[in-house]
Amino acid sequence: MGNWSGLGLHLIFICVFLFASTYTCLGVGNVSVICSEQERLALLNFKQSVQDDYGMLSSWVGNDCCLWGGIQCDGVTGNVQHLHLRGDYYNYCYITANKVSSSLAELRDLKYLDLSGNLFQKSQIPDFIGSLKQLSYLNLSDAEFSGIIPHIGNLSNLKVLDLSLNFKLKADDMAWAFGLSSLELLDLSSVDLSGAQNWDMMLHMIPSLKELSLSHCSLSNVNLGAFLNSSRVLPNIKHLDLGFNSFKGPLTGIFQNMSSLTFLDLSWFDLRLAWNFPNLLSMIPSLSELHLSGCRLDKTHLSSPRLNFTTLSNIQHLDLSHNPLGGIFPSFLTNMSSLEVLDLSNTMLNSSLPFMPKLLELHLSGNELKQIEDVGIWRQCHLKQLRVEDNEFGMEMFDSPKNASECSQYALELLELSHSLNGRIPETLGRLANLRYIDLSENRLTGSIPESLRALRFLEVLYLSYNQLTGPIPEFLGNLTQLVLFSNQLNGSIPESFGKLAALTYLDLGSNLLNGTIPVSIGQLTKLRYLCFFNNSLEGAVVEAHLANLSMLEHLDTYSNTKLTFNVSRDWIPPFQLIYLDLGSCNISNGFPQWLRNQRKLQRLVLSNATLSGPLPPWLRKMPIIPYLDFSHNKLSGPLTNLPNGGNDDPLQYPILRLEYNLFNGSIPRSL
């Protein structure tokens, strides 16, 4: 529920390369001192122990490790204090290893260690972590660790411990936590704690704890029996997440002394006993954010005369999603005078919403709403985010009613209406002048893209994919960073004005009826990472000028444009490193693409039906193995010995290798 710009399933952001002269996923280290030789060698040993396909550690060269990406050193001693190696699997920015190298134990002054988001292939968290006694921050989340959490109770300076999202990780005894006397944040979400002992002791012995997250931990009343009956635990807690476990029965005195609690998540906690909900609110007057998703509440539980409206007036963020509230909007919500964020997704709601003057964020996905006016889009003047996905195409998107009270100015910045709409996109959408993010994908929208969208000068993200839109693509202006028009019936040529969208990082025009040539102005989009034109009727040539300035490009797809020719010189050196390249069913001139020899990050390469002939070039053999490789339907000839294998004779590991309909001869290499 955070900043709108980080949301949306279609958003694809690749790691930002921050090092001035070397591609790396990490920032540069500090530069005022020189690191010790012992620690430099320890870091190099760590580097040698991992597989770094995406160059996270590519800046780790030279004699001064304090200059390397992800490293921060003490300004006086030069000892390494911070190691920031956070990976991002979905955006091709991570390292892989079968264990964490023990060489990191040499970094005895390490205070900050972040290895989250990498792939440690179900290895165990190493015991030596417990010897890094200066650590105050340890993040090993989402890194494929498994097994039992080791004893790390010696870390008396540790303030933050995040082991979340390691789905094969378990705890059999929480005694290791007793020594974490400084701990303020503990996140064990998605760690299996069903067999853990000593919970009650741990929660008494860490009085400094301010944030505790135990969601999806397979916990039940048996695990936390003493915890649920104690009124003496967690005296300073502000953030408590117990959601998505298997708790049942009435709430007891657990919250009575939690006078500082501001965030509480009890999602999937069975709260059907009518007295629970009112009592809960009265016990926690400081609460400002409450998540009760899937708690089996219905309208009778939320209309109790015992509801404390004084307490309700303090809540700013309320999640009641996945509860059978029924068709009518719960009237008690109108008494919540401070409410800014409301989630009523999947609550069987089918009625219109009243005007709520302070509401900033509204979630209504998965309901049975009939028209866009039911959500009050033209009346909620201060609303900044509106999400109404998956209403089964029940809503028509009408223009604003002439007799309805409207706002002189709209604050709406995010509008998400996928899988909910039919009809046309109204011109009045352009009146929502502050829109920055629009998702109208996977609907049944017809007609043309309205010209009024061009007036949205703050618009950054526009998703209109999987509709039945027709007509030409408008000449968009402004700050667009992502434009996705995939799978429509748009026709005409690609507007020349696209070259003026200087902030554009993601452009998908695939699977339409576009014709004409690709404008050379596309080559001016220096921030572009994703470029897709596949399955259109484009023609002409793609030349070096189309690509010369696209230094950030990682995804290029022109598949199935049979009149399109890829025509660059044999000695051309591209400015980018691609991860995905598909030129299938296009025409490639000048023989097998020589420029591919400089591409070291390819995960998918498709050159099928691309008029290629002759033998595979010898340099291809020295390229890294490409997991998805398709050279089918050409006239390639000669032996298969020059397939990419990194220049060694190890068995090749191709999940998909397509070579059919060529003229290869000779024997199949043993490596295959």
Image: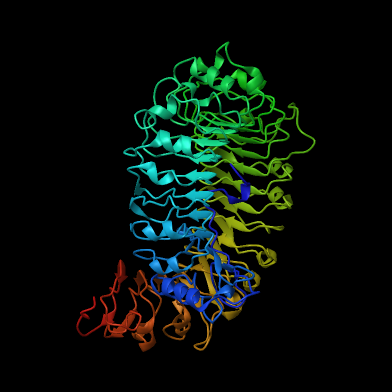
Q: Position of residue 210 (x, y in %)?
A: 56, 39
Q: Quadrant of the N terminus?
A: top right
**In the image shown, does 117 or 48 lie closer to the viewer?**
48
Above or below, 21 against 94 in this view is below
How did the renderer colour the structure?
A: rainbow
Q: Quadrant of residue 549?
A: bottom right
Q: How many marks?
A: 0
Q: Quadrant of the C terminus?
A: bottom left
Confirm whether residue 221 shows in the render. yes
Above or below, 72 against 303 in this view is below
**In the image shown, does 599 or 185 lie closer to the viewer?**
185
**In the image shown, does 549 or 267 lie closer to the viewer?**
267
Q: Position of residue 273 (x, y in %)?
A: 44, 16
Q: Position of residue 426 (x, y in %)?
A: 66, 41
Q: Quadrant of residue 425?
A: top right
Residue 371 is left or right of residue 390, and the answer is right
The residue at the far right in this view is 408
At 26% from the left and 85% from the top, the residue drawn is: 639
At 40% from the left and 28% from the top, the residue drawn is: 226
The residue at the far top in this view is 305
Q: Position of residue 50 (x, y in %)?
A: 40, 70
**In the image shown, does 68 or 588 lie closer to the viewer?**
68
Q: Quadrant of residue 421?
A: top right
Confirm whether residue 269 shows in the render. no
